[in-house]
Amino acid sequence: MTNRKKETGPSGIPADRRADFLELMLLSRECDRRSGIVLRQGEAWFHISSAGHEALAALCELLEPEDLIVPHYRDRTLLLARGMDPEAQARDLMAKAASHSGGRNMSAHFGHREGNVFSVASPTGSQCLPAAGAAWAAQLQHREQVVVCSIGDASTRQGEFFEAVAFAVERALPVLFLVSDNGYGISTPTADMSPRALGLLPPDRTTVVDGADPDAVHAAGRTALDAIRDGRGPHVLWCELDRLDPHTSSDDHRVYRSQEDLAALRDPVELFGARLVEEGVVDASWIERTAARHAADVEAVYARVAAEPAADPKTVMDHLFAPEPAVTDTDTDAAPLTEPCGGTMVAAVNRALATGLARHPELVLFGEDIDDPKGGVFGFTKGLGEAAGARMTNAPLAEATIVGAAVGLAAAGMRPVVELQFVDFAGPAWNQIAAQLTTLRWRSLSAWQCPVVLYAPWGGYLPGGGIWHSQSNESLFTHLPGLRVVVPSTPEDTEAAFLESFTASDPTLILLPKHLMRRRREPAARPAPALGARTLRGGTDVADVTVVSWGNGTELALDAADALAADGVTADVIDLRWLVPLDRETVAASVRRTGRLVVVQEDNRTSSFGAGLITELLSRDDEFYSLLAPPRLVTREDVHVPFHPDLERAVLPAADDVVAAVRSVLA
């Protein structure tokens, strides 16, 4: 990133921009003032003030249109500088239908796709890893782009901030971490607990600046951005400033701040205005006239927006997923498998990843130990290093980094495919999965998209796993709107799921049953359909019972069906494969024929996907009144999977349990 022309001349905001920048600060302050009035009038429900943070927008004087801002909820002035005008900010405050989120995101959770401003999520610090991922995308795509990641000082104690800084330093990523140090985390003083106070920030990559002074921010920002654009990696711009208003409209800082403290607060608008008067750039009457004009204009804008409609509640389900594309005869991805495939699921994953690398130049593989020569702990990526080149790389031992970076990569136009060594270790990544990955499309009305493919070994029936290597916790993930979840049980289903997901517009989680992964299978008679459930046995009007499962449970279901067939009992055995989206009709049609339902899972009972599936199937009259017996759930009871093989077998369902459940519904 060395071809960009650097600015020359004195530090600080240039002479021809000084009055304009003061006007921007005055406009931002008026938007904050008017927001408070609108809130008290009952036209809004929540407000976060940016008063005291206006000087940080001086960075926008140095940014290019293609640079990305990943903002903080006090960045109103930054957003104004990037084109989110008072009308758009009023719609954000009042959660109107025409707002950037259609009323779905909280006020001051800004987003502005046209200005290349990412969407804010509430969990503090969760923006840092996606910002690093977006910067990585710029590096991979050889684009001259800087990512500005804005964050409050209290939030820098979040582990994800440290992970993002470490990842950016490791890869020399073009990220500027813009820290607003207003001295408080709501009511808690941060002077003795921030990473800077504790000496935890790299001194050669950290600049402390007076964040109430636009000229100081501009000068320090120019130096930092020049270094970043020259390829010298990330920088932390630590801006000391004052929060002039309470934390939010739900707070009263007079409760925990003294009158002397409040009286000593520095107002960047007043300070910069006084400086420009002293310089002769403007006079006091100009400031008064400009403030009065903004007051009248903003009042009119906010009044007009208040009369606009809120979003139609009927549209609240829109943008959870991308619309399903029409399939044409020329769509080469409509039939993902060109020929039947056998072998093992591990080989199928490897084959699918190789195909994805060849078909999709934007595909990136990322995970712990995935690079050659190891190729991952299960060998999924073994031998792909030469073909992948820089598009396959080992991740640090940090699951939040893996998923968070993938969010940024995907939002920036890449197609990340990331591996977790075991789904049991998804906990550190949960914040990214639940707060960023699965909400981004919905909260931004599809302005931002997140087509990440996440895969992980899953489930038990492989002795020696124990509590942290044998979980089958699919219900945790199917509970998250916006995430597609598939559990294949054969090599052909595995390959089909991967190849379909490489072209999907939404995030996909592929759970790979460890018990079945190395089991060799003969090639299927024909390619598997990419989506939907599959009937493994039966599917006729003469079946006595419907048995539904997925993953390892399909083996139990088929073994039970064999045992029952000896007694003349026939079963429709259905492999759901895709839990989200659920192929309800395939299961429902079978239940209407048989009148009996058994669901088999290895997850524990309470709040499980299997329990939810039964509820879903009984929620409609056609299926409910077709039942000849109460449904049965074959499941692990609410206990962890133990380490000793005998104990594991004692808690996991077996084929005999399925046979017993079928006999009970036939009785």
Image (cartoon, helix red, strand yellow):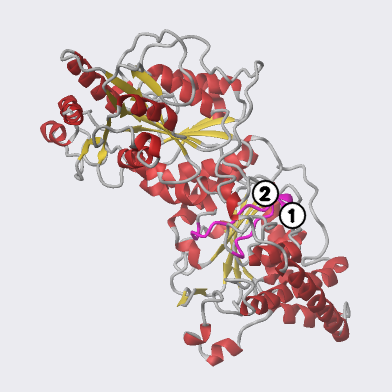
Residue 42 in percent (x, y) is at 62, 76
Front-most of residues 541 and 400: 541
Q: Judge whether residue 124 is colored magenta.
A: yes
Dot 1 alpha-carbon crowd within 10 angstroms: few under 14, some 14 to 19, many 20 or more: some
Position of the N terminus, as image quadrant, is top right
Q: Is residue 646 left or right of residue 547?
A: left
For label 1, the residue is 63
Q: Residue at x 65, y 71 (%)?
A: 53
Quick check: marks 1 and 2 in contact, CB under 8 Å?
A: yes
Say which of 111 and 659 sits in front.
659
Q: Is residue 231 left or right of residue 535?
A: right
The quadrant the C terminus occupies is top left
Q: How far is the residue under mark 1 from the one under mark 2?
A: 8 Å
The residue under label 2 is 146
Q: Where is residue 45 drawn, in percent x and y?
A: 58, 71
Q: Is residue 552 visible?
A: no
Say what amino acid the circle numbered 2 marks: Val
Q: Mark 1 or mark 2: name the one nearer the start of the chain.
A: 1
* Residue 105 seen in the current view: yes
Residue drawn at 20 percent across, 30 percent down: 665
Numbered range of the magenta stretch: 107-125
